[in-house]
Amino acid sequence: MDRSVAPGEDFYRYASGGWLDRVSRPEDMADWDILSIMGERVVRQVSAIAAEAGSGAASAPEGSPVQLVGSFYNAFMDVAAIEERGLAPLQDILGAIDAIVTFDDMTRFMAAQALTGGPGLFNIIGPSPDPADSSRYALYVAGQEFGLATIVLPVLALPEDDSRKQAYRRYVEDTMAIAGHDAAEAERIAALVLRIETALYSGMLSPAEGNDPRLRYGKLDFDEVQAMIPALDIGLYLDEIGFARPEFLVMYEPRALGALAELWQTAPMADLKDYARFRVVAKFSAFLDPAFRDPGLALSRALVGTARDRPRDEQVPGLLSEYLGHPSSRLYVDAFFPEAARAEMAEIIRRVHEEFGKRIETLDWLTAATRDEALEKHGKMVFAVGYPDSWIDFSQVAIGAESVANIRALAAFDLERTLGKMGHPVATDEFASRTTLPTAVNAAYQPAANRFEVTAAITQQPVFSTEMDPALKFCRLGAVAGHEMTHGFDSGGRQYDAAGNFRDWWTAGDAAAFEAEASKLIDQAEAFEALPGLFLNGPQTVRENMADVGGITLAHLALRTWLAEHPEQDVEIDGLTQDQRCFVAWAQFWTGKSSEDYIRTKVAADYHPPGFYRAVAPLRHVDAFYEAFGIGEQDPVWLPPGRRVRAW
């Protein structure tokens, strides 16, 4: 802290000035904050677990987590064998590209990649709960994958001569050169990749548009979808994978097929094949010659200002998260998750959830009909802490000495599980997405399941410890949970009902009142200058900003209830009351240092605003924050009551 600064003058500086002065952002980290520090700890922990599993893999039972993780690790770490193989593991895929002549050939190739872990080429169709009936599956047109990570996709909308777009061109060129193409060929392929992906990206929803479920869940009859792109035989694609032909498709990316249709009408098949070659090489590059890593590091430096060139063993945790999430998470939980703390964490979250119910009952802007629906949704909301009650069984997957073969085997296993679910009621795999694995430093709400999960990896210092005082427990871990609960009722989440169905359960007047509250957050964000001349996007960040306000509001209320029941713990520590420590704990949770390039990238594409905004902006909507520090309307931090959000 920097207590020389008045909290009402600059609360960010007051709460975190000592850390900001003392701590330097590592040169190879674009963002450095509590979550980054915890993430680096988890990388080291999982790396050590994987190395230990590697030592014991040969003697471990076949299909056990130790054998699976250990064999995966050993294959990835055997650099000499990888270099000796060169591109041999991809030769059958590259040969299949050579054999493509017609669009039907390309369609079969796309399906084959979906079956065996290759890139999602040109069009991705897959299952997810039906938005109108979350108990059953529907098939979605989910859009296009790209050679760029999602967070930096807006690069494709930049002018051709922009340095960031040129950096992506160099990445493609360098990747293809390492793959064996001469300089002229690599340059030609890079140019066409940018041309193709720029065209396809033009058909994607913008980040702000993608934040609105109403734009994601349009349904079209199968024949209508097929008519949008005659060259792509969607029925053939589905048949090749094994999906039954549906009556309708959910248009998660409603404009994507139109952009693809135009591309296929204008681009020579030779260009599409070269694009496929690049995507295949890029998809599997992590498991090929280590030289393929260099272009990606250079691209990262160009886009976010820096890149972490991890030693090879520290690259394994990210790959395990993508491909062997549950087996590696089982080992992590056994080694690092304190079971004794799980019950206490669940109790804190239960108390925050209880406060939410009390809030809904007393909100005077809701009419009875909408309030009853909101209470039903709140009452049916479920949560889980740490890890799943039932782990996904990977024991039948053969993991051996060659990494590309391992990835393809894992992809086939995953698709077989997916096909096995079709035609049956939706069954939620707990802690199964990459963002909610027990090894992910995260928590997340799933609107179609009306459920949120708080992972094992985020329930560690400095977010949670059994030794913390109540203020820190509630206003870090509890606020994280409250944030996820509020997502069920934010600008997007409120459009789902108690069962997770996409349904309008609001009266017109209540919906208008909600939008008026949300507009306050939009206005607040758009007035915030993250960098000189760079302002936040209000509609893009409104859901996260509303969840932040809800999270800290509910956490503080739960803290006060706890302290009323345990007055002996309502004590000052280091001269700060429990209320004051609560709000300082929140601000410190979001304190960090970032490169300017990272901030620009985040503002352009991320639904989450920068941490230095989140540290203080939500607090300005909490009356108790002003009371705790004696902040008045004469202070810069003061937000007039009429501009404070009262949604939840």
Image: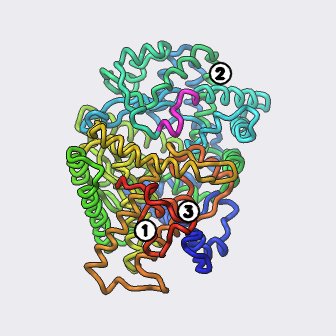
Q: Which mark is residue 476?
A: 1
Q: Is residue 204 magenta?
A: yes
SS state under label 3: helix
Residue 399 visible: no
Q: Which residue is mark 3?
A: 36
**Could you tell me residue 193's position as x and y percent?**
66, 29
**Distance of mark 3 from mark 1, alpha carbons?**
15 Å
Q: Is residue 24 left or right of residue 545?
A: right
Q: Is residue 642 left or right of residue 596?
A: left
Q: Nearer the viewer, residue 281 or 135?
A: 135
Q: Which residues are magenta?
A: 201-210
Mark 3 vs mark 1: give the one in front: 1
Q: Amino acid at mark 2?
A: Asp
Return the disc, 1 or 2, that comes first in the chain's sequence.
2
**Distance of mark 3 from mark 2, alpha carbons?**
40 Å
Question: CB of mark 1 within 8 Å of CB of mark 2?
Answer: no
SS state under label 2: helix
Q: Which mark is residue 271?
A: 2
Q: Amino acid at mark 3?
A: Ser
Residue 477 visible: yes
Query: Circle 3: is it few (<14), some (14-19), or many (20+) Cα within 10 Å?
Result: some
Q: Extreme right residue here?
A: 184
Q: Is residue 321 left or right of residue 354?
A: right
Does 162 appear above or below 343?
A: above
Mark 1 vs mark 2: give the one in front: 1
SS state under label 1: helix
Q: Amino acid at mark 1?
A: Arg
Q: Is residue 581 magenta?
A: no
Find residue 457 and report its image quarter. Answer: bottom left
